[in-house]
Image: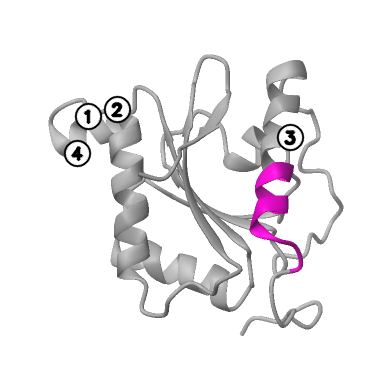
């Protein structure tokens, strides 16, 4: 049984755009000064029921999304699978984050030179193409449509600089 530390909000506690700005500001801090030591030292009992965003990230991304976005433990609801690839399980996880935890933002985060993506498709597709495809697949696979105040975006990590670039809509 899951025990919630506090009641869940009726809706997102901040807008998707504000949340994305906060994440990208954190990523700029990482690029400028590196990963913060003790980034997960928020306290003995972080509240897992109030993440600010959900991230579908590749299993072999060189660092956890929380570190890449300079966020504390519990700030992001993270699902990591090779690719990152949308599956029935990842869809269910992200629906939980949106509809139960009320995150205003879902990020599909790929990275340059992804070996698991290369192995899965037996070629080296452009990571941007793959991430955009996964964003479309995720949007089309949801059993319940995203609320109007929830945003779904694709992004790509440059593994050398640790810069995260949000992809524009097609």
In this picture, residue 154 sits left or right of residue 51: left
- Secondary structure, mark 1, is loop
Which badge, 4 or 3, is on the more N-terminal residue?
Answer: 3
Pointers 2 and 4 in contact (C-beta within 8 Å): no
Which badge, 4 or 1, is on the more N-terminal residue?
Answer: 4
How much space separates mark 1 and mark 2, taking CA atoms?
11 Å
Viewer-side label of 2, 3: 3
How packed mark 1 is, by other alpha carbons closer than 10 Å (few <14, some 14-19, many 20 or more), is few
Q: Main secondary structure of the magenta part?
A: helix
Q: Which quadrant of the rendered structure holds the N terminus?
A: bottom right
Q: Which residue is mark 2?
A: 115
The dot on residue 120 is 4
- Secondary structure, mark 4, is helix
Q: Which residues are magenta?
A: 13-22
The dot on residue 25 is 3
115 vs 109, nearest the viewer? 109
Q: Which residue is mark 1?
A: 125
How packed mark 3 is, by other alpha carbons closer than 10 Å (few <14, some 14-19, many 20 or more), is some
């Amino acid at each position: 049984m899951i025990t919630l530390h506090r009641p869940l909000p009726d809706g997102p506690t901040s807008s998707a755009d504000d949340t994305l700005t906060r994440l990208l500001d954190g990523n700029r801090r990482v690029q400028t000064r590196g990963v913060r030591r003790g980034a997960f030292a928020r306290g003995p009992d972080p509240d897992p029921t109030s993440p600010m965003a959900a991230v579908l990230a590749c299993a072999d991304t060189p660092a956890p999304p929380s570190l890449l976005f300079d966020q504390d433990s519990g700030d992001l609801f993270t699902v990591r699978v090779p690719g990152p690839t949308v599956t029935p399980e990842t869809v269910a996880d992200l629906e939980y984050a949106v509809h139960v935890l009320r995150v205003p933002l879902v990020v599909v985060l790929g990275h340059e030179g992804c070996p698991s993506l290369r192995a899965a498709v037996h070629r080296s597709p452009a990571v941007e193409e793959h991430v955009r495809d996964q964003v479309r697949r995720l949007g089309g696979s949801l059993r319940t449509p995203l609320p109007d105040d929830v945003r779904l975006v694709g992004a790509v990590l440059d593994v050398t600089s640790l810069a995260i670039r949000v992809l524009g809509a097609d």
